[in-house]
Every structure is written in structure tokens, then in C-alpha cells.
Image: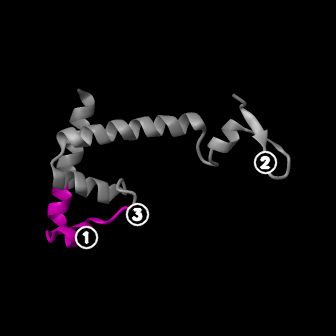
Amino acid sequence: MSLYGKDKDDNVVTLQEVLENNERSIEDEIDLKLKLKKLYEKMDIVLKDREKSIIEMRFGLDGSKPKTQNQIAEIFGISRSYVSRIETKAIWKLAKAFEE
């Protein structure tokens, strides 16, 4: 398997250059993906559906832009302070799960 090729201008391009973005190395990107996979696994195990949804929305883990507690409160029809309590409890549960 070739680890290099040529771009449209006939310049040599390595596989790492193709896979790397300007902000992270390929190693950092793989590490991030592995950590995210582990996070999702823990979320599925330890969080209730509403807790998981709030964490996903709050931090943009659902693929959308992160939402504020006020935006989430509107979506669920609950108070912002209740969203805050659910978020805090969910983060605590996840932290505990990662300690085990």
C-alpha cells in the first residue's frame, strides 16, 4: 500500500497530510475518536434517556451546535435550573463511571 500520492498539481502528498487537519495530528484525531467512543458507551450504560439527551445537546454531541441551558429548558418544557441540575448529575455519573 502506498503511503503517498500526487495531488492535481502533481505534487507529492503523504497519507498523513491527507488525514491530518490543520489543528490536530492524526494521532490526536484517533485518540479523540477512541475517547468519544468510550464516552458514548458510558453514556448508554449510566445515563437515563433525558440525561443523555441533555448532555448531547448541551455539548453538541448530537452533531449540532451546543445549546444553552435556556434553549434546552425550552425544548423540554422545564426550568433552566432543572436543566442545570440534570446536567450536573449526569456529569457526576459519567465521572464516576470513568473512575471504575
Give the residue type at disc 1.
Asn
Q: Earlier in the sequence, mark 1 or mark 3?
A: 3
Q: Earlier in the sequence, mark 2 or mark 3?
A: 2
Q: Which is nearer the eye, 7 or 27?
A: 7
Residue 69 is left or right of residue 4, and the answer is left
**From the viewer's perspective, is residue 68 above or below residue 32?**
below
Q: Which is nearer the eye, 65 or 86?
A: 65
Q: Which of the 4 image quadrants contains residue 3?
A: top right
72 falls in the magenta region:
yes
Q: Mark 3 points at which residue?
A: 65
Callout 1: helix, strand or loop?
A: helix
Give the residue type at disc 2.
Asp
**From the viewer's perspective, is residue 80 above or below residue 25?**
below
Q: Residues within 10 Å of mark 1 (few under 14, many from 20)?
A: some
Q: Residue at position x 18%, y 40% from top?
A: 46
Q: In which quarter of the image is the C terminus?
A: top left
Question: What residue range appears in magenta?
Answer: 64-86
Q: In x, y percent, where is residue 64?
A: 39, 62
Q: Nearer the viewer, mark 2 or mark 3?
A: 2
Q: In which quarter of the image is the N terminus?
A: top right
Give the residue type at disc 3.
Lys
Residue 1 is left or right of residue 57, and the answer is right
Q: Name the residue under label 2.
A: 7
Q: How crowded is mark 2: few (under 14 residues within 10 Å), some or many (20 or more)?
A: few
**From the viewer's perspective, is residue 70 above or below residue 45?**
below
Callout 3: helix, strand or loop?
A: loop
Label ID, residue 70: 1
